[in-house]
Image (tube, grey):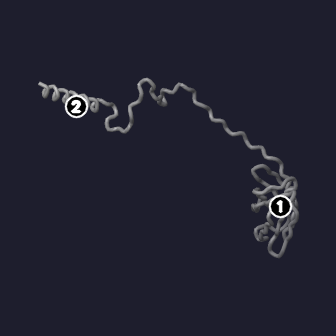
């Protein structure tokens, strides 16, 4: 009788375990069952209103006051040097632009670096063959994370 009771108990335990595996809803899955008292909300069950993402405010840059230090026509090239008068910083760029009747013809960027009290543009040399002959306008602009601005227009005569 003891032996029969042991066999019966073993069969009931095996059947119970096998039945749980058959009826478990995620059979073959590696996921753990969730706690029925604290269910994890799904996207459709979320009751909170979606959080609106804020568009970052545009960065207002301070005014840079660049100027053309000099330009010089040497043989078949023109060299332009500019500086920014109202601050000294590294990391910005000077943009040298030549215009013909308010239309940009040539635009080149050069790095700028801090001097004692100003920001100096690296010298820029451009071939005269890239520019039309006659009167054109020259402007030096400055851009960085904190500053932007442009110089007065300077008239240049290209031979």
Q: Judge from the rendering whether residue 33 lies leftward or rightward of residue 141; answer left or right.
A: left
* Mark number displayed over residue 14: 2
Image marks 1 and 2: residues in contact by CB distance under 8 Å: no
* Residue 137 shows up from this direction: no
The tally of labels here is 2
Screen quadrant of the N terminus? top left
Q: Residue furthest left?
A: 1
Residue sitting farthest toward the front: 2
The first of marks 1 and 2 along the sequence is 2
Q: Tag 1, which secondary structure?
A: strand
Q: In terms of depth relative to the viewer, which is nearer, 62 or 32? A: 32
Residue of label 1: 120
Note whether 95 is above or below 49 in the view shown.
below
Q: Position of residue 156 (x, y in %)?
A: 87, 65
Q: Which numbered circle lies on residue 56?
A: none
Q: Quadrant of residue 89?
A: bottom right
Using residue 1 as the reference point, say whether residue 36 is left or right of it.
right
Q: Determine crowd level at label 1: few under 14, some 14-19, many 20+ residues with C-alpha closer than 10 A.
A: many
User: Quick one: quadrant of the C terminus?
Assistant: bottom right
Give how far apart the Cα atoms at labels 1 and 2 are.
Answer: 85 Å
- Element type at mark 2: helix
Q: Is residue 62 above or below residue 83?
A: above
* Front in this rendered view, residue 29 or 151: 29
Looking at the image, residue 100 sits to the left or right of residue 33; the answer is: right
Q: Nearer the viewer, mark 1 or mark 2?
A: 2
Q: x%, y% of residue 129?
A: 77, 71
- Which residue is rendered at x = 39% and y = 36% of the image? 31
Q: Residue at x 23, y 29 (%)?
A: 13
Counting from the top left corner in percent of width and height, residue 51 is at: 60, 31
Residue 11 horizontal side relative to residue 87, left or right: left
């Amino acid at each position: 009788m003891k032996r029969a009771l042991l066999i019966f108990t073993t069969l009931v335990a095996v059947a119970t375990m096998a039945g749980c595996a058959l009826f478990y809803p995620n059979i073959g899955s590696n996921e753990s069952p969730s706690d029925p008292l604290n269910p994890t909300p799904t996207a459709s069950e979320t009751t909170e209103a979606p959080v609106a993402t804020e568009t970052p405010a545009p960065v207002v840059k301070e005014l840079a006051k660049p100027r053309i230090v000099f330009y010089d026509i040497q043989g078949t090239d023109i060299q332009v040097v500019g500086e920014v008068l109202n601050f000294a910083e590294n990391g910005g760029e000077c943009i040298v632009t030549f215009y013909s009747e308010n239309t940009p013809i040539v635009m080149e960027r050069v790095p700028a670096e801090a001097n004692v009290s100003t920001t100096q543009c690296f010298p820029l040399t451009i071939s005269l063959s890239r520019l039309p002959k006659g009167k054109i306008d020259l402007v030096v602009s400055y851009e960085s994370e904190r500053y932007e601005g442009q110089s007065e227009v300077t008239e240049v005569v290209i031979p």
